[in-house]
Amino acid sequence: MKLRPNPIQPLQRKPDEILRANEERFRRYFDLGLIGMAMTSPAKGIIEVNDEICRILGYERSELLQKSWAEMTHPDDLEADVAQFNRVLSGEIEGYTLDKRWICKNGRIIDSIMAAKCMRQADGSVDYLVGLLLDVTERKRAEEALRASEEKYRTLYDSIDEGFCIIKVLFDERDKAVDYRFLEVNPSFEEQTGIKNAQGRSMREIAPAHEEHWFEIYGKIALTGEPIRFENAASQLNRWYTVYAFRIGEPQERNVAVFFRDITARKRTETELLGLEVELATELTAMTRLNEFSRDLRSNTELESTLQWALEAIISLQNAEFGMVQLYNRTTQALEIVVQHGFRKVFLDYFSSANGESSACGRALRSKQRVIIEDVLTDADFALHRDIAASSGFRAVQATPLLSRAGEVLGVISTQFREPHRLSSRDLRFTDLYARQVMEILERKQTEEALHSTQAELAHVARVVAMGELTTTIAHEINQPLTVIVTNANACQRLLQADTVNLNEIRAAVTDIVAAGQRAAEVITQIRNLLKKRSPDRIPLDINELIREAIVLIRHRLETHKISIRTDFAPDLPSVLGDRIQLEQVVLNLIMNGVEAMIPIDQRPRVLTMRSAKDEAGNVLVEVKDSGIGLLTTSVEQLFETFFTTKPSGMGMGLSISRSIIRSHGGRLWAMENTQHQGATFQFSLPRVA
Ligand code: ADP
């Protein structure tokens, strides 16, 4: 219970008439019953009550007139009431107000605000007191409930992890929010923001990390009352918050309650995860591309297009604008640009000549290490080339050497960027993987070239050996026309010595001589061709004619071994592009193998079938079929291995050389066992001239 701070001040004594007049007015209020009213005299106790008082205290009027105030007053409030009453009696005050509790008839305790005013007699003694009683129990309860609920919320706000504050938004006369004050903050507020003693202070002054649009949001909520939830970054603090804000209290108070939570850690994880996802996706794409590249490499045999392809892949991987692949020429001891992307010719000429010096590629060549220049303007070693870099349009460059397994630099792959550029470790890693692939192609090419020259050597040896074996054939082939020539020449002599010269016969003999001479010359030319050591050249060839020529060389051998030859040539065969000698050697090899396979056969005819045809793709197909012993191995592929032989004096080189010759012509050579008749069949196909 508390005393109201302003006790009603003593009034000047009033004349009796005024008192009566007052009483009149007073009576009206009294009867209106809006407020509990009672009149009590010090001598007689309660002398009058109105209905409202009866309602409040729960007594009948008659009962109340019998009662004393003191017995209905809550014992705790009695003393204060009596003290004030005595002050009135003593004339010290004219009245007083008091918060006091009453005990009702049913024992219920009610809260009231009581105002007492005394009416005096002319001599100044108290005539009676008018008491006004306002039942504030409900209001009190509501207040208490409010306090309790406020307390409850307070405990809640104090214990939650979310930062909480109530902000008062101050507006100017044009409803523009001008300032924001913290009315309340909870402990988490301080923890999360690091701002101490915020209460009562301006947000702009103590929370500068708040960006302008946050203020705008609070201003809008204060005006419209629309709650809002948002996520935002306090960029100066480098932190992220999720914020829930709503208007609180009476609209005109323009207070905004804000809950917020620091989600920086979650955001970071999210960003990291997102980054990781992007990273993984990029990695996967790069891997897939690399994989496709290395798979396609196997089918692409053309060096230049392969290098171009690799370069494009690296450029797209690194997001570069320019690039080139240079190969090291051992003879000139310089790098030569083989393929490039994006450069104009004038720069290419410059780069070709400047490689030995301090250029990135030149450095990579000499150091055998990757050279990265993130910005040509700041790299001192690159000073010499700055101008050319500027005019060709690049600011950054990387040059990766192509190192062979033996540690030799075979070339350099470089890429250039328009802007200063730093390559990620992934880009570098993948660049290395591409470089390794390129390096493998180069090494393979080198090996292939070495193999080709060895094969050419071997082919030559084989030819010489084959020629040795063919000596008898050759002797026969030349002997035959020689015999024809000699015989016919003799005949001519005889005819000329005769009495009557038979010109017709002589003409026929001379024609035979010429034909035989030509034939012999042809044989010799072919032998010379076969024995010549020369690099292959490609001309359009009629394969049927080529087979016929080969048969000419071998005919004697066929006859010796009583081998009959059958030919089945397609008449409309397209030409093939190839080296006559090499292809003839293949045909000869296959025929000789067939012959050798048939020599042991006695029970059935020895037949060699030579066939030419156009296959489904329109390419030229050649078949050499024998009725010999058949293939003596279960693995057909084994026959084509170098040095594989089943013959006591065999070299095991014929088929392997033949296959590599056919392959170098873009064709295929394979073997199969005959199904119906015993023996074997060898076939090769060659692409026709486009
Ligand atoms: P070589 O004739 O010196 O053995 P090749 O490379 O020409 O070398 O042939 C390898 C092997 O393939 C022969 O030893 C033989 O076993 C087998 N071969 C080749 N041609 C035939 C054929 N027409 N019939 C049966 N076997 C064959």
Image (cartoon, helix red, strand yellow):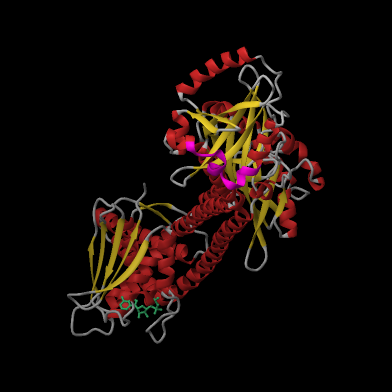
Name the residue furthest bottom.
648
Vertical placement of 385 versus 558: above or below? above
Q: Quadrant of residue 147?
A: top right
Vertical placement of 424 versus 660: above or below? above
Q: Is residue 3 left or right of residue 136?
A: right
Give the quadrant of ligand 1.
bottom left
Vertical placement of 569 versus 115: above or below? below
Point out residue 109 in the picture as x, y percentages from the top left corner.
50, 44
Q: Is residue 6 left or right of residue 433?
A: right
Vertical placement of 426 versus 118: above or below? below
Residue occupying image coordinates x 31% and y 81%: 634
Tell me if residue 589 can be seen.
Answer: yes
Q: Nearer the viewer, residue 671 or 153?
A: 153
Q: Nearer the viewer, residue 423 or 93?
A: 93
Q: Magenta region: which residues?
A: 66-79
Q: Nearer the viewer, residue 367 or 475?
A: 367
Q: Is residue 196 magenta?
A: no
Dominant secondary structure of the magenta stretch?
A: helix
Q: Is residue 67 magenta?
A: yes
Tell me if residue 501 can be seen.
Answer: no
Point out residue 41 in the picture as x, y percentages from the top left corner.
58, 30
Q: Nearer the viewer, residue 655 or 343?
A: 343
Quarter the N terminus occupies: top right
Point out residue 174 in the picture as x, y percentages from the top left corner.
62, 16
